[in-house]
Amino acid sequence: MSHPHNPLSHGKIAIPRLLAPKSSSSGGAASKTSQGDRSRTELACINCRRRKVKCSGDLPKCVYCTKLDILCKYPPPRRDKLHVATSRLEGALSLLEDLRARQSSHDQERIQAILDDAEAEEQLQTSSPPNKRAKLSPPTTDTNALSRLVNDDKRGESMITADAGSNESLDVLEEDLIRDTKSRATGFIGKSSVIQWIRRLKLQIDLKDKGLSTQIPHTFGPPGDDDASSAARVTAGRLRRSAYSDDAQESISQSTYFMDDESVDISVEDPFYLPAPHLAKHLYYCYMSTVHQSFPILSRNEIDLDFNSIFSESAQQNRNSFKMLATLNLVFAIGAKFSYLANGDLHVGEHDHLRYSTKARKLGITESTFIAHPDLERVRILGLLSFYLFSIGQVSRASNTMGLTVRLAYTLGLHVRNEDPVTDVRIKEARVRVWWSLYTLERLICTISGRPSVIADEDCSIFLPVPLDESAMDDDDGMELLQQWFDQHSIGSPHSTLTAQAHPKSIFFRATTQVSVITHKAVRHLYSANTVTKSWEDTQNTMKHLKDELDHWAKNLPQPFTADPFRVGAEFQRETRILTLMYWSAFIIITRPCVCRLDIRILDQTEQSDKFNQYAASLCILAAKQIANLFPKHVDPTFPYKNGPWWFVVHNMMQAVTIFLLELYHRTHHAPGAGEKKDILQHLQKLIRWLKAMGMNDPLAYRGYRLIVAVVQNLAPQLDMTVADMLGVEQEEEAASAAENIFQDMITNAGGIENLFPDPLFEMQSHAGYVQPGFEFPQFTTPFESPGLHPRPFGATSPVFDVQAQFMDPREMQQDFGHMFSNQNQAPGTSATVSEGTQVPSSYFQEYPGFLFQGNQTRQGS
C-alpha cells in the first residue's frame, strides 16, 4: 500500500538549507553566502580584483578601499558590456554597407564577405534555443540607473576618451627616438605640431594603399583616471596599432621639415671682428624694425648706446666686452637671416648669419654658462639665441636653449611682481618686457614642436607690460605715467582688456602676449597626455570655451589693428597681419581635433555632438583658407618675410596646407558643399606655389615644399587625380612664364640689368666684409643715412621681382600690390575672406569679431 503524502515512502528526506547569520552591515553590491567563516561576494570592485584580495562588496566603498582611502569603483555587469559591444558591431556593419558602393570591386568583395559572415552568424543565433539566446542578447531589464540613462540618451561622446579625436594616442611614444643621430636631432614631437599631423596623414595614406585601413578597429577606451580605465585605453591603442604592418610605421624624422639635422657651426678666424659699418647698420635696423617690437628682449636705449659705442672704442676695449659683443653678433645674425630672406643676396650671403651666431656663441656662451650664477645679460643672450635658432628652423635646438633660458629667468625672479620700492620703475618695466618676450617665444616654440612648456602659469604673478612706448619712458611725463601705471595696476592679468588710450606699439606686444596665453591653453587642454582621461564631451566643451576666449581677445583689439592692412595709407599693416596670422593659427590649433571621421569613431553620439564636430571641422578648414587668403595671388618670394612674422610664417603655411590635405583625404566630408573640393584645391595650390617660390632662399620653406609634394604624390591616386592636378602645375607654369616676361621687359626698359640694380652693394664680391674695430663711427638715427643703403626706385609694373630692401614705404607697397586686392569691401586683417562656394553656418558670422569678417559671407577668393 502506498502512501503518496508520506515523504519517507520515497527513501529521501528533505534537509532544510542552513541560513547564514545576519550581517551587521547594511547594503552591499551583491548578496553574500556564508559557510562557516568563509564568505563570497558576487561582484568585487576593480581595486580588489586587481590586487586579488577579498572584497566586501559594500557601497559606496568596500572595506578594503575604505581602509586605503582610495576610489572604489565596481565594473558594469557583463550584460551592459555586451550591449555596448553589440551596438558598436551593428554600427560598424551599417557603415560597411554604406561604404561598399564607393570602393573598388576587390574591396567590395571583401566587405560583402564580412557582411555575409555576420548575417550567417545572426541567423545561427536566431535558430538557437531560447535559453542559449538569452545569454547572447542585450539585457531587457535595467540593473543600473546610470547605465539606463546613458543607453537611453545614447550619449556616446561622454563614454569615450578624448583620444578619439584626430590627435589619437596622445600619451604614447610609438618609436625609439634614441636609435640614431637623425631621430635624436628631431627629438620628441607632440601632437599639436604639424609634423605629427603630416605623419598621421602619411600613415593613413600608406595603410589605405596596402589595403589595411579597413582592418584597423576604431576602438577607444573610456575616460577616467582610474587604473581600469587606463588599462582599457592602453589595450584599445595596442589593438589599433596591431593592425599596422611593420613597414607601415612612419617615424617622426621621416615627416619633419625642421632643420635640426643641419649643423649650425661655421669656421670663424677671429670672433672680435666686426662687420663693415654700413653693413652693421643695415643688419641692426633689420632686427630692430622686424623683431624688437614682437620680442623686446633687449632694452632699446641700452642696445642703441652699445651699438654706437662699439665702433668708437679701441679693439682692446672691445675684447673686454664679451657679453656686449655676443649680444650684437646675435642681433647681426638675426638681421642677416631676415635680410637674406627679404632681399635675396643683395646685402648678405646665404651663410653669413651662421658666421655671426658662431662668433656670438664663442664670446657669450662658454662652459661656465651652465654652472655660473645667472645675470640679466646672460638671460638676454640665451633668449636671442633661442629666437635665432627658431628663425632658421632649428626648432629642437631652440626648444632646448629656451628651457635653460626660462630656468635662469626663474632664478632671477623675473616671473613674479617686483615690489621693491628702491628699484626704478623703468628697470622694472624693462625686466617685465624681458619676461613676457621669453614667455611668448617659449610658448610659440612649444606649440610648433608639441613639447610641454616649462612655464607654469600658476607660478607667475608678473603683470603685463605697460602700454607705453619705450621712447616715451625717458621724459618726465612718461616717467610719471609709468609710475601711475605701476601704482594702479600692480596686479595684472594676461587677459585684461587693452587700454584704448595706450600707444599702439605697446598694445601690439600685449596683444601677442595674450594670444600666446590662449594658444598655450589650447595645447595644454587638447594635446597633452592627460587629455586622454577626459571624455570627448569634455573636449568639445573645452574647444567651445577656448574659441569664445579667442573671439573675446579679437573683439577687444583697438582700432589701429582692426583696419584693413591693404588699404592705402593704413597704419600698422605689418602688425595687423601678424595678429591675424596668430589668430587663425590659434583657431586651427583649437579646432584641429575635429578634422577626422568622428562619426565612425564615436558610436551612439547625440545629434548635437555630431553637429558640433562637423561645425568645428568646417571652421578649421575656413581658418586654413584665411591663412591662404593673406597671400596675394601673384607670388613674390620676399612678400611674406617683409610683411609678416618671417620667423614663423612657414609654420603657419604648413598648418594650413596640412588641413587642406587632411580634408581632401577625407573626401571633403566636413565641407560637402558644391564646389568645395575645387575651392580647397585652389587654396592648397596657392600655398604650395608660395612655398616653392620661398624655398629658393629659405631652406625651411624648401623642405616644407618637398615634404608636401611627397604626400601629394601618394595621396593623388587615392583621389583619382594626378599629381599635376593637385599641385596646379599648369597654372604655375603660366604664372612663371608671365613673370619672366615682365622681368625681361623691366631689364629692357632699364637699359640692362646693371641699371636695374644700382645699389653699390649689389656689385660687392664679398657680402660680409669685415673690418678691425677701433675707428670713429659717426652717430646715426636712421639706416638710410649711410651710403649704399638708400631705398632704390623701383617700377610699379611688377611686384613679383621686387628685390628692394624691406624699407619700402607702405603707401608705395599699396600702389604696387593694389591691383591684387580690388575688393574694397573685404575684411580688415585679411586679403579676402570666404571663397566662393564655401559652406559655413550663417550663425558663425554673427558671432565673429568684426576685424576678421565684414560684409557678405561669400566672396570671391584670390
Image: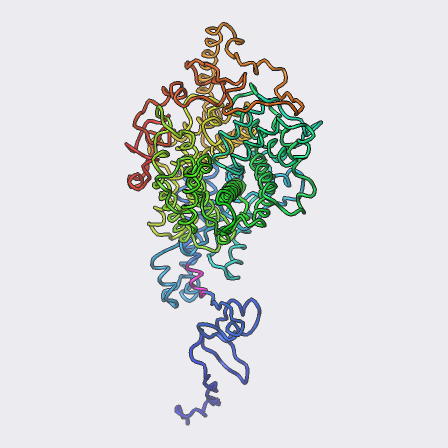
Q: Which residues are magenta?
A: 76-83
Q: Nearer the viewer, residue 97 or 218?
A: 218
Residue 251 drawn at (x, y percent): 59, 40
Viewer can see residue 825:
yes
Q: Answer whether residue 91 is magenta in the image.
A: no
Which quarter of the image is occupied by the C terminus?
top left
- Tally the marks: 0
Q: Is residue 251 above or below residue 637?
A: below
- Considering every residue shown, the one lying at the far bottom of the view is 1
Q: Which is more toward the observer, 837 or 724? A: 837
In this view, the residue in front, 339 or 845, is 339
- The secondary structure that dominates the magenta segment is helix
838 vs 130, nearest the viewer: 838
> Was residue 81 drawn as part of the magenta stretch in this picture?
yes
* Quarter holding residue 25: bottom left
At 48% across and 6% down in the image, what residue appears?
A: 748
263 left or right of 581 in image:
right
Q: Position of residue 344 (x, y in %)?
A: 54, 21
Please provide percent x and percent y for residue 288. 51, 30
The quarter of the picture where residue 128 lies is: bottom left
- Colouring used for the render: rainbow
Residue drawn where x is 57% and y is 68% of the image? 51
Residue 2, percent from left and from top: 41, 92
* Residue 121 to residue 497: above or below: below
One can see residue 192 in this view: no
Quarter of the picture holding the N terminus:
bottom left
Outermost residue toward the right in this view: 269
